[in-house]
């Protein structure tokens, strides 16, 4: 399994889709699965069940995706906050797409359906998560100022190096 993690706006879904094509592997986005299975938008789940309710659903969906067929899987930016999810990532190839806060803000814009990007506190959220991403990652890739194609090239190279005896 190749898992993409990182903050909102890191490009996990865009890069994940391209990486899947490059590696000839299916691509799956945990947020898309959550929305599809529940029939509700992420923002609606936050509104009705709160963040904790969303995190429970997210943990369950990710648990299933990580034991499913080999795929490129992108996780929501807050997924690594759950201990169970961090434990389940062990043994997988986990690619951390790093982005600086200013660029994440630019890419996310006014939120685009992301409840946690709407209000204040983004800086604190960002600072609190960096260590989690770094701890989970087996490969790190800086995305700031770079195109998705460039990033995919880097990841493909790192994956080949990973495979060397
Ligand atoms: C979240 C990030 C979102 C989505 C939800 C919560 C977060 O995913 O899971 O809005 O806590 O950072 P993206 O990182 O794909 O935007």
Image: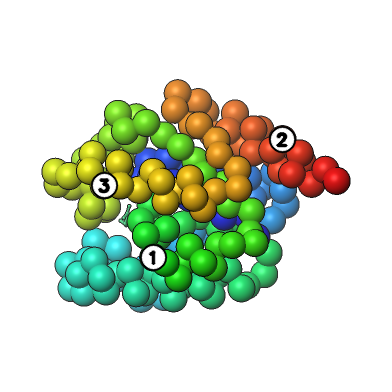
In-front residue for pair 43/10: 10
Secondary element at image label 1: loop
Report how far apart the C-alphas of labels 3 and 1 lie in the structure: 14 Å
**Residue underneath mark 2:** 157
**Residue underneath mark 1:** 82
Identified at 24% across, 66% down, the residue is 51
Q: Which mark is residue 148?
A: none
Does 158 sit left or right of 106 as displayed?
right
Does 46 sit left or right of 93 as displayed?
left
Q: Which mark is residue 125?
A: 3
Identified at 46% across, 37% down, the residue is 98
Q: Measured along the vertical axis of the image, is residue 126 above or below residue 149?
A: below
| Dot 2 beta carbon under 8 Å from ligand 1 | no
In-front residue for pair 3/106: 3
Q: Are circles 3 and 2 on residues that touch, CB within 8 Å?
A: no
Residue 26: x %, y % from top left: 64, 59
Q: Earlier in the sequence, mark 3 or mark 1?
A: 1
Quarter of the displayed picture in which ligand 1 can be seen: bottom left
Q: Earlier in the sequence, mark 2 or mark 1?
A: 1
Does 81 sit left or right of 25 as displayed?
left
Secondary element at image label 2: helix
Residue 18: x %, y % from top left: 60, 43
Identified at 34% across, 74% down, the residue is 56
Q: Are circles 2 and 1 on residues that touch, CB within 8 Å?
A: no
Q: Is residue 4 visible?
A: no
In-front residue for pair 76/87: 87
| Dot 3 beta carbon under 8 Å from ligand 1 | yes
Q: Measured along the vertical axis of the image, is residue 37 above or below residue 155?
A: below
């Amino acid at each position: 399994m190749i898992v993409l993690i990182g903050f909102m706006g890191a490009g996990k879904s865009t890069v994940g889709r391209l990486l899947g094509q490059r590696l000839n592997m299916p691509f799956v986005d945990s947020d898309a699965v959550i929305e599809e299975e529940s029939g509700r938008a992420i923002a609606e789940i936050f509104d009705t069940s709160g963040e904790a309710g969303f995190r429970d659903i997210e943990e369950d969906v990710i648990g299933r995706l990580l034991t499913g067929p080999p795929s490129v899987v992108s996780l929501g930016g807050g997924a690594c906050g759950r201990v169970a999810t961090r434990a389940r990532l062990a043994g997988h190839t986990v690619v951390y797409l790093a982005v600086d806060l200013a660029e994440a803000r630019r890419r996310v814009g006014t939120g685009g359906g992301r409840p946690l990007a709407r209000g204040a506190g983004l800086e604190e959220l960002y600072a609190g998560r960096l260590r989690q991403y770094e701890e989970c990652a087996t490969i790190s890739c800086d995305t700031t100022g770079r195109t998705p194609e460039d990033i995919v090239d880097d990841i493909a190279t790192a994956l080949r190096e990973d495979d060397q005896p």
